[in-house]
Amino acid sequence: MLEIEYLKDPNGKATGVVIPIEVWKQIFPEEDIALDELSDRLEDYCLNQAMDEAKSTPLLDRKTALQYLEE
C-alpha cells in the first residue's frame, strides 16, 4: 500500500501531495523530464497500481457485480 500524504490547509482543502522517494524514483528514474512525459508516467503508474490491486481482489459474479453498481 502506498504511503501518500495529502497536505491540507486549515479549512481541510487539499493543497499538495507527498510521495515516498522510492515511488518517485520508480516513476522518474532520470531527473530531467518534460511536463507531458511526467503526466504520462503518473497515469501509467496509477493504472499499473490499480491492475496489481485488481489481481488480488476476488471476482464478483454477475448478480453481485450488478448490485454493487446500483449502490
Image (cartoon, rainbow, N blue to C red):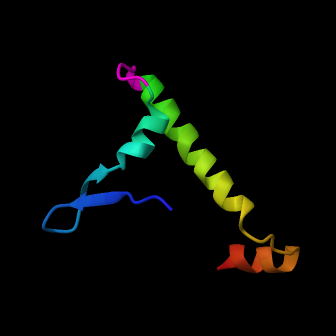
Q: Left or right of 18: which side holds 26?
A: right
Q: Left or right of 54: which side holds 21?
A: left
Vertical comparison of 65 with 46: above or below? below
Residue at 70% from the left image edge and 77% from the top image edge = 68
Vertical comparison of 5 with 11: above or below? above
Q: Left or right of 20: which side holds 50?
A: right
Front one among 2 and 16: 2
Which stretch appears magenta? Answer: 30-35
Q: Quadrant of the C terminus?
A: bottom right
State whether the magenta stretch is mostly helix, strand or loop.
Answer: loop
Image spot of residue 8 (x, y percent): 21, 61
Residue at 67% from the left image edge and 52% from the top image edge = 51
Image spot of residue 63 (x, y percent): 85, 79
Vertical comparison of 50 with 64: above or below? above
Image spot of residue 70 (x, y percent): 69, 77
Residue at 40% from the left image edge and 40% from the top image edge = 24
Front one among 29 and 62: 29
Q: Please count the marks in the image.
A: 0
Residue at 62% from the left image edge and 46% from the top image edge = 48
Q: Left or right of 33: which side holds 63?
A: right
Identify the image quadrant of residue 32: top left
Image spot of residue 65 (x, y percent): 78, 74
**Residue with the most extreme left position:** 10
Q: Does the magenta run of residues contain 8?
A: no
**Residue with the most extreme right position:** 62
